[in-house]
Image (cartoon, grey):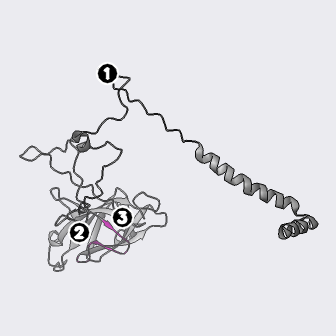
Amino acid sequence: MNAVTSTWRQLVRRRLWPVAVLLVAALVAVPLLLAREAEVPVAAAPPVAIETSKAGDEIAEPVVAAVTPEDRARRRRVLGKVKDPFRPAPPKKTKAKAANVPTSPGPALPSPDTDTGSSTSGGTSAPAEPAPEKTYYSPGTIVVRFGEASETAELARFAIKKMQAVPDDELPLLIYMGLTKDGKKAKFLVDAAVDVDGDGVCKPHRSSCETIELAVGETEFLDVISPEYDEATMPESQKYEASFQLDLVDIKRAGDDDVK
């Protein structure tokens, strides 16, 4: 008892006796509470009564139905494409390149409603010819018609630039020198072996025609003198070996749609 008494006195002296009282009470109360909880029986859950559904009773049908083999074989319907995770992916398809395919597009085919005016023996319409590309001229270019001076001859139409020969370099009867100062006429240098006659204005004089000036719509006739002609011994009917006709059709000026 001396040890208990001395311990108690030390607790009282140090003012720790309330803690000692609480510890003693806890030591007594804990075994009592554990013994009381062990004596209380655990109530078993009441059995759930399963009611069998009668025939024709739709309310008593179970919410979850048994799965049949047919239901297992049937796939669910989902949005998108159904994919089997265990099935290997199909190989990618590559587009086969066509052999001998032209890189540039061909002529446009006419639509079925378009009447091209010609058809093949099989009844299908022939492809329409592509529209010709527009021709552009430089400023000062002239368009002429040139050919033999006869009623049956056809005159060729072509363009002449400044300082070019008419009709060409092999037969330079005239040289196109450009436009006059007012731009209304084309000026030509006349070859010495050519006599001219027509609407053109001869300079310096008609009897000595070194140059001629032609306006649009005017015509000039060019008579080529034969190199074998002798005025003293040969008649004038044998003076010329050829005659040509020159028509000035158009003068291309800056600002026209076909001038660049």
Q: Residues within 10 Å of mark 2 (few under 14, many from 20)?
A: many
Can residue 115 be seen by looking at this rendering?
yes
| Quadrant of the snapshot with the N terminus | bottom right
Query: Along the horizontal axis of the image, is 120 left or right of 260?
Result: left
Asked whether residue 161 is drawn in magenta, I would say yes
Q: Amino acid at mark 2?
A: Asp
Q: Which residues are magenta?
A: 159-170
Identify which residue is drawn at 34% across, 26% down: 52
Q: Residue at x 86, y 70 (%)?
A: 2
- Give the label on residue 223, or none: 2
Judged from this view, the residue extending furthest toward the top is: 56
Element on which disc 1 rests: loop
User: Which of labels 3 and 1 is toward the front?
Assistant: 1
Indicate the quadrant where residue 3 lies. Answer: bottom right
Q: Nearer the viewer, residue 253 or 229?
A: 253
Residue named by callout 3: 142
Between 174 and 26, the one nearer to me in the picture: 26
| Kind of residue at disc 1 | Lys
Q: Quadrant of residue 18?
A: bottom right
Indicate the position of residue 124 as horizontal and vertical percent values: 12, 45
Residue 73's x, y, as percent?
23, 44
Q: Which residue is mark 1?
A: 54
Q: Quadrant of the C terminus?
A: bottom left
